Amino acid sequence: MIDVPVTAALTDCAPVIQSDCSIVAAATQLRRPDVPALVVVDAMGEVAGVLTESDIVAAVAEDGVTNPVERCMSTPVVTVAPTTSVGLAADRMRDAGVATLPVVDADDGYQGLVTRDTLAPYLSRKRLEITWDDEPLRIE
């Protein structure tokens, strides 16, 4: 397992929105190519959900666009601690079937977001490391 903490793989841009934000305002933020998802926080500043493009598409298809994001965000939220390794974060992401993980501290304070894209360089590099414990190969 990879021992690099997820804090090394945080996204550069992971906006936080309030749970009463409109879907239209959230969609406007998600149009930016550097925004993979929006982290939804409650009145206490704790992570309450994650909003992705697919959540908005589902909301528009089912209910129209007048609902606040709290009605269409993904919950329950799967999170990781800042000290979680990228390998364990990737496992948690795969097991939960999600593409983003908010990173929260012990007080449930939002620290950042890791995505499949930000974890990939760490996982790919690890998979390419090959150790050979036998004699060198020879081609004759």
Image (spheres, rainbow, N blue to C red):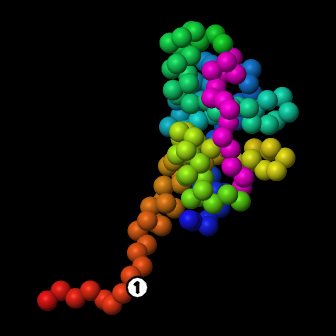
Residue 41 locus on image (x, y percent): 75, 32
Does the rendering let one see residue 136? yes
Residue 92 lies left or right of residue 131; in this view the side is: right
Residue 106 locus on image (x, y percent): 82, 50
Q: Which residue is mark 1?
A: 133
Residue at x 67% of width, y 18% of height: 71
The front one of 112 and 79 is 79
Residue 102 locus on image (x, y percent): 67, 43
Residue 78 located within the stretch drawn in magenta? yes
Residue 137 locus on image (x, y percent): 26, 86
Vertical order, 72 against 51 (above or below): above
Magenta-highlighted residues: 68-82
Quadrant assignment for the N terminus: bottom right
Quadrant assignment for the C terminus: bottom left
Does the rendering let one see residue 34? no
User: For residue 55, what is the image quadrant?
Assistant: top right
